[in-house]
Image: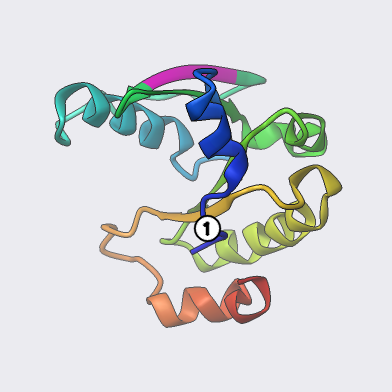
Amino acid sequence: MGRAMGSSSSRARRNGRPVKVLVIGSEGVGKTLLLRQLANMAKRGKAADIDTATIPSIGTELMQILYAKANFVCRELGGSMIPVWPRYYEESDLALFIVDSSSEPKLASATIELLTALKAPGLARKPFAIVLNKCDSPVRVPEASVEGIMRMDDVI
């Protein structure tokens, strides 16, 4: 779900400069673990067991992921930093909005954050993906309900 990959990230990769990926989402949605798994998959070529112990991200975390001759610098902003997310929009090449799909209340609050982010001028015309995390949870919200709660027909 989200906008298609746009020219800014393609241009960055062709120019040899790192692709700046902004990773945002509420607290506890799994941003850190998702990035760890992506880095692991880029390095080893497959998913593997990773350390799932985390503490809430405070501030910003940077992680470099090398994949397919591209250098991705992922900036994860902790959920407690929602008020300052817009400061990072302009400098990013693309954004990933991570959502916990195992909790209806979290989906509702994520929808507000998502709609606010999508209206921001700094993200206009930039590739933007909505990542439904925790889809493997036994208590996950059905996809049709997620689409309704998050107003996907209005967003996409």
Q: Residue at x 77, y 51 (%)?
A: 124
Name the spot of residue 137 as percent of width and height, x first: 29, 58
Q: Residue at x 38, y 37 (%)?
A: 34
Question: From where the camera sits, is residue 20 visible?
Answer: no
- Residue holding disc 1: 4
Left or right: 102 in relation to 136: right
Q: Residue at x 67, y 47 (%)?
A: 126
Name the spot of residue 21 as percent of width and height, x first: 56, 32
Regarding mark 1 in the picture, which secondary structure is present there? loop
Name the spot of residue 106 as percent of width and height, x first: 57, 59
The quadrant in which the C terminus is found is bottom right
Examine the image and state in which quarter residue 94 appears. top right
Tell me the kind of residue under disc 1: Ala
Q: Which residues are magenta?
A: 61-65
Vertical placement of residue 154 versus 62, above or below: below
Near-viewer residue (149 or 152): 152
* 62 in magenta: yes
Near-viewer residue (124 or 144): 124
Left or right: 49 in relation to 112: left
